[in-house]
Amino acid sequence: MFLALKEIKKEKLRSGLIIAMIVLISYLIFILTSLALGLARQNTDAINSWHVGRITLNSSANTDMRQSFLTAEQVGKLTKKEALIGETSVVAKAAGHKQLSAVFIGLDETQFVAKNLVLESGHQVKQAHQIVVDDSFKLEGYKLGSRIKLNDSQTRYTIVGFTKNAKLNIAPVVYGQLTTWQTLRGLTNGPVASAIVSQNTHYKTTKQGAKTYSTAKVIEKLPGYQAQTTTFVMMIAFLMVISLIIIAVFLYILTMQKLPNYAVLRVQGIPSRVLVGATVSQSVLLVVSGLVFGTILTIITALVIPPAIPMAFDIPVLSAVGAGLLVMALIGGLIPIKSVLSVDPVSVIGG
Amino acid sequence: MSSFSVKNVNQIFGTGTAKVHVLHDVNFEAEPGTLSLIMGPSGSGKSTFLTIAGGLLTPTSGEVTVNGETYTDRTKKQRDALRLDSIGFVLQAYHLLPYLTVADQFKLVDKVKPNGNLSKAKLDEVLETLGIEQLINKYPGELSGGQQQRVAIARALYPNPAIILADEPTAALDGSRVKVVGELLKSLAVKHHKAVVVVTHDARLIEAADHLYEMQDGYLTKK
């Protein structure tokens, strides 16, 4: 550590440039991770907010809630841990406002999903023609009391509440009554819901034509979700590997430049472990400094970024990414160790 | 008993037609308080002698003893420890660590070998003797060649070794500086009671030497 600190102190420009490079790499990875996380959450926020473990759909719906219809017979008797969901895509419009593509979720206000809905402002849906919407509607100028039309219906629905992070498939969610869902889908008789969601992780339907899935399975089948998350995970993984290579190359060059100095230290009888310790601790110090500055930059970004940009700054996830970068840098720092251990002190004898 | 001795050392590099016999039955002894000069032309085996004497290279045969301890049969790690304790090197190009101040060059030794080094008072005395006491917070890059060399001598002396091995210490110096360095190495031997061994081809150092050796084609003879 002594040698590492002294070298960093003396070689400020060189150390600064390496730290700057690590700052940029970590900042890029943090921002991309936040973006990936933000987009992934916009796909699943609504489902996650229900805190359900099992989802029952029509067995012919290809695990897609929007394609699923369950009849009263298929729903059967529900306990307090089950709730009905009716999902459909809608276009929300109101005079003087931009049209918004949204997902309508019909709920039964006596069941747990509606009861547990956390509102940012306003109140729960109490009657037909009332809706609670995601707070992204505010960005388009919608307020409590705004009256909107859904699809081609001439019925106006009043916004009575705003809820946070209510997104499904990146579209904002409009919560209303199940009867509204039936109206929007033109279902006067027959299907009563798209899905049964259950807090009971062992819940399984026995009804003909219905099938129960884990929530993770339904999320996985959300259109585009798998492709999107896989792309981001691959991107971040490649960035990690690229950062490993870049950091390793820099640290390798840095170490190779010092080999004549290390040869002198070996002549003096300084043990190899001291030189290895100096090399590794220098790598750790540079990378940790870079990560700290990268984190500060990310925090500043999180504070100033417009809410419309789907980024989620999740501290445990970003900490794990930071730790991953540190591990990568340590691996990079260990690559030149063989050269350090095999440094030949005789090379400095005899001029 | 001599503080440093080399007995029947042979060094052979390569095999078959590429075989080179660099040192032939070399014998050498150095007493504390004396300056021994080993002279010879380039390629005569001086540097090989120095690397073997300093425990950096294991000879093909023979043994090297420092303060009664034979280290030619020791492991690399043990030789490192012995070198740190008992042998000080002054290298031709000084080779001070560029990112350590003069003070830090000594602190580094303290970090690795906390005991047995010169006391603060003794170090101050050495620095004063060498005329570098004002340079303690300077980096090597801020020093002249002569100043760097004196710092290198102080650094070699700091772990309080039994012997000092100097490799061409005057190679980069002009005539007036050669005399000063010769006197300095001599006073180092006498004042600090060290066995100082200088390997050089610089005949201007002869007048400072107590013992003169000549290396010729791998054979060492006392003059």
Image: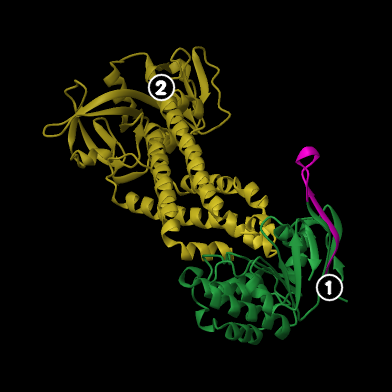
Chain colours: A yellow, B green
Residue type at mark 1: give it. Asn
Q: How far apart are marks 2 and 1 (CA)?
A: 87 Å
Which stretch did the figure color magenta?
B5-21
Q: Using the image as rendered, state which of residue B149 and residue A178 is in the foreground.
A: B149
Left or right position of B59 against B201: right
Residue on which the image places disc 1: B67
Left or right position of A185 against B132: left
Q: Could you say where residue B57 lies in the image, as x and y percent from the top left?
A: 76, 56
Left or right position of A343 against A305: right
Q: Which of marks 2 and 1 is in front?
A: 1
Q: Quadrant of the N terminus of chain B?
A: bottom right
Residue on which the image places disc 2: A65
Q: In which quarter of the image is the C terminus of chain B?
A: bottom right
| Residue ID at (49%, 75%) | B138
Q: Could you say where residue B150 lies in the image, as x and y percent from the top left?
A: 58, 76
How packed mark 2 is, by other alpha carbons closer than 10 Å (few <14, some 14-19, many 20 or more), is many
> In this picture, is B12 found above or below A128?
below
Q: Quadrant of residue A33?
A: top left
Residue type at mark 2: give it. Met
| Residue ID at (47%, 57%) | A289
The answer to whether one can see residue B201 in this image is: yes
How packed mark 1 is, by other alpha carbons closer than 10 Å (few <14, some 14-19, many 20 or more), is few
> In this picture, is A59 found above or below B173?
above
Q: Could you say where residue A256 lies in the image, as x and y percent from the top left?
A: 56, 50
| Residue ID at (78%, 79%) | B32
Could you say whether the residue bearing mark 2 is in a helix, strand or loop? helix
